[in-house]
Amino acid sequence: MSTTAKPQRGIQALESTGTLLEALVTAGRPLPLNALAREAGMAPAKAHPHLVSLQRAGLLSRDASGNFEAGGLSLALGLMALQRLSPTGEAEPEILALAQATGLSAAMAVLGPVGPTVVRLEEAMRPQHVSLRIGTVLSLVNTAIGRTFAAFLPEPVLDGLLAQEPVRMAGLGAESSTESSDDARTMKPPADYIARLSTIRDQRFDTALSNPVPGIDTIAVPVFDHTGEVTLVLALMGSTGSFETAFDAEASQALRAAAHRLSWRFGAVGRMDRVERMDRVDDTGN
């Protein structure tokens, strides 16, 4: 007896309807009939009955210009899905895949009450001295993960967290620093700190090269949620010289792709559209 599972029977018409919904999501904006049909690879005359049914079901509605957009039922389903998401749980497979694909250590951090905090670390197979551990609290000034969070924080929130930076740098559960405790208590961000954060916002990417841990390089990228806030920061780490850290290097592309997939799953559609346009400009030079 064959153990091969038979494909389940579906309804072809509903699958065609799903193609229209997928095209609208990919566009990320309301579309008129002709444009939506074109994006779905369907003739307008064929698409129209599907769209009428989607409106009646509440999955689509039409704006004042007659363009199709998400309806009330779609919004309710989306909110239900978002409420059930666990960002760290969703990111777990990505962390494992990154470590396996790159041979580097992969980490995930969230913004905790004291500062950026490592909640997941997958060590590299080849030995390397990485000072991160689960629960490590990171500097907002001296680490790529910390700066990536800082770049997207509202100014009052950032100022409040920077006021706690000496505590982190003094070693209260914080990442080790080469500075003395006296230096840490009087530490201020470097003169180019604000400009550095602006660059991170533009690129959605940062590096820390042999600092604060000598001999270890880090690349970090943000993961956005449906509100446009950074919910996670992903990072790859390895011995200095063992991998390229440029924006378009292989490891960086893998890390950015993982962050993009997670951001899309967390509902950051419009923001990711802007990132994709930025990447296309970087790739083409135009």
Image (cartoon, rainbow, N blue to C red):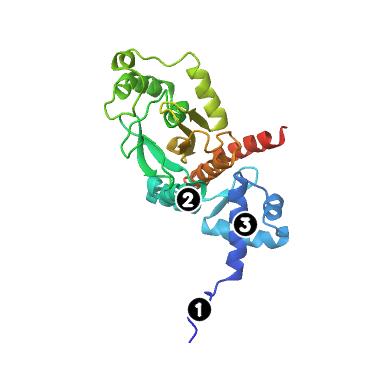
Outermost residue, front direction? 127
The residue labelled by disc 1 is: 4
The three-letter amino acid code for the residue at tag 2 is: Gln
Which residue is at 43% across, 45% downward? 124
- Mark 2 Cα shell of 10 Å, populated few (<14), some (14-19), many (≥20): some
- Residue 44, x across and y down, in percent: 72, 58
Which marked residue is nearer to the observer: mark 3 or mark 1? 1
Nearer the observer, 267 or 151: 151
Mark 2 → mark 3, Cα distance in angstroms: 36 Å
Compare marks 3 and 1 and give the one earlier in the sequence: 1
Compare marks 1 and 2 and give the one earlier in the sequence: 1
- Mark 3 Cα shell of 10 Å, populated few (<14), some (14-19), many (≥20): many
Mark 1 → mark 2, Cα distance in angstroms: 30 Å
Which marked residue is nearer to the observer: mark 2 or mark 3? 2
Nearer the observer, 95 or 9: 95
Which residue is at 44% across, 47% downward? 95
Mark 3 → mark 1, Cα distance in angstroms: 32 Å
Compare marks 2 and 3 and give the one earlier in the sequence: 3
Position of 51 with respect to 81 (left or right) is right
Dot 1 falls on a residue whose secondary structure is: loop
Position of 265 with respect to 67 (left or right) is left
Position of 85 with respect to 44 (left or right) is left
The residue labelled by disc 3 is: 20
Which marked residue is nearer to the observer: mark 1 or mark 2? 2
Tell me which corner region of the image, top left, top right, bottom left or bottom right, holds residue 167: top left
Nearer the observer, 203 or 227: 203
The three-letter amino acid code for the residue at tag 1 is: Thr
- Indicate the quadrant containing the C terminus: top left, top right, bottom left or bottom right: top right
- Residue 280, x across and y down, in percent: 67, 38
The residue labelled by disc 2 is: 100
Outermost residue, left direction? 172
The three-letter amino acid code for the residue at tag 3 is: Leu
